[in-house]
Image (cartoon, rainbow, N blue to C red):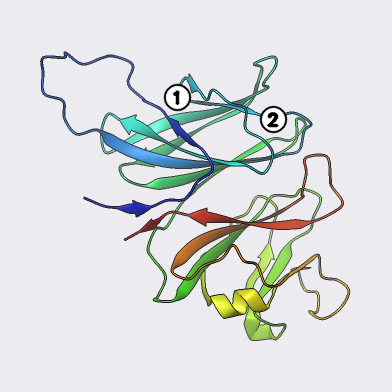
């Protein structure tokens, strides 16, 4: 049996099947697939999520993450994710994605009412090398041009992500904790590090630990803030 190390803010449980089995029959082991929800939708209200017809009981705040799972009828199944207005229940955006047994999928909503976007992306749970960190970045701001990311310095070899566009998720990068603590710099694509063009320059983050996987979300610190730029690290599951 596969084991996963998880660290999440909230947990929601969902079932893709609505019929109760015969209590006298022996139940097969459930087939589960897991998801992580991220809210970077820039409107003044929180969101409600509906997963395969089941609604989360609590509204999802901007910048928050929610973990949950579905029971599948087979080793893979198409699951519908829907975001709704918390007061009116009006649907904002809906999309289908094929989830697989024991796999994790990231689902992120971004944009605004005029241009909402739902992103689906599978997670790679392979652990980093001993003492290292695996990280990737997601660009969630429609107000920002393509971006470059540097870790651990400003030389060309320290550029780990190039030309990351809005709605895009980068590939995974393996790096050391020392480099991450030294600096993480986000620049407009093609800009020179060490100038005043840096949008984000973080050092000494104490939320990072070796032998872990992280998602770095580049966006805004609040749903009404389209001027300031922020980088938030989210702990990700690791298979061990």
- Nearer the observer: mark 1 or 2; the answer is 2
Q: Is residue 188 visible?
A: no
Residue 159 visible in the current orientation: yes
Disc 1 to disc 2, C-alpha distance: 20 Å
Q: Quadrant of the C terminus?
A: bottom left
Q: Residues within 10 Å of mark 2 (few under 14, many from 20)?
A: many
In the displayed structure, 204 sits above or below 41; it is: below
Q: Position of residue 216 (x, y in %)?
A: 61, 59
The residue at the point 54 percent across, 43 percent down is 9
In the rendered image of this protein, does residue 124 appear above or below residue 72?
A: below
- For this view, does 19 lie left or right of residue 192? left
User: Tag 2 or tag 1, which sits nearer the N-term?
Assistant: 2
Residue 63 rendering spot, x and y as whole percentages: 67, 44
The reply, left or right, for residue 142 in relation to residue 137 is: right
Q: Locate residue 226, reporting x and y percent.
A: 84, 47
Query: Residue at label 1?
Result: 52
Image coordinates of residue 153 in percent, x first then y, are 69, 82
- Left-right relation of 57 to 91: left
């Amino acid at each position: 049996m596969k084991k996963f190390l998880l660290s999440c803010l909230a947990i929601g449980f969902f079932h893709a099947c609505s019929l109760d089995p015969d209590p006298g029959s022996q139940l097969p082991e459930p087939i589960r697939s897991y998801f992580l929800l991220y809210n970077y939708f820039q409107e003044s209200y929180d969101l409600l999520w509906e997963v395969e017809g089941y609604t989360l009981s609590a509204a999802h705040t901007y910048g928050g993450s929610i973990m949950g799972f579905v029971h599948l009828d087979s080793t893979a199944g198409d699951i519908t994710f829907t975001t709704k207005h918390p007061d009116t229940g009006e649907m904002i955006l809906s999309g289908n994605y094929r989830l697989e047994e024991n796999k994790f999928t990231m689902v992120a909503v971004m944009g605004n009412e005029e241009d909402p976007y739902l992103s689906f992306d599978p997670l790679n749970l392979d652990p980093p090398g001993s003492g290292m960190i695996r990280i990737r970045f997601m660009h969630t701001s429609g107000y920002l041009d393509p971006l470059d990311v540097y870790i651990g310095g400003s030389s060309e070899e320290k550029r780990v992500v190039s030309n990351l566009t809005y709605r895009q998720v980068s590939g995974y990068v393996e790096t050391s904790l020392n480099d991450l603590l030294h600096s993480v710099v986000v620049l407009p694509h093609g800009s020179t590090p060490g100038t005043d063009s840096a949008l984000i320059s973080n050092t000494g983050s104490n939320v990072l630990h070796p032998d872990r996987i992280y998602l770095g979300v580049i966006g805004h610190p609040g749903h009404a803030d389209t001027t300031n730029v922020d980088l938030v690290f989210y702990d990700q599951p690791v298979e061990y």
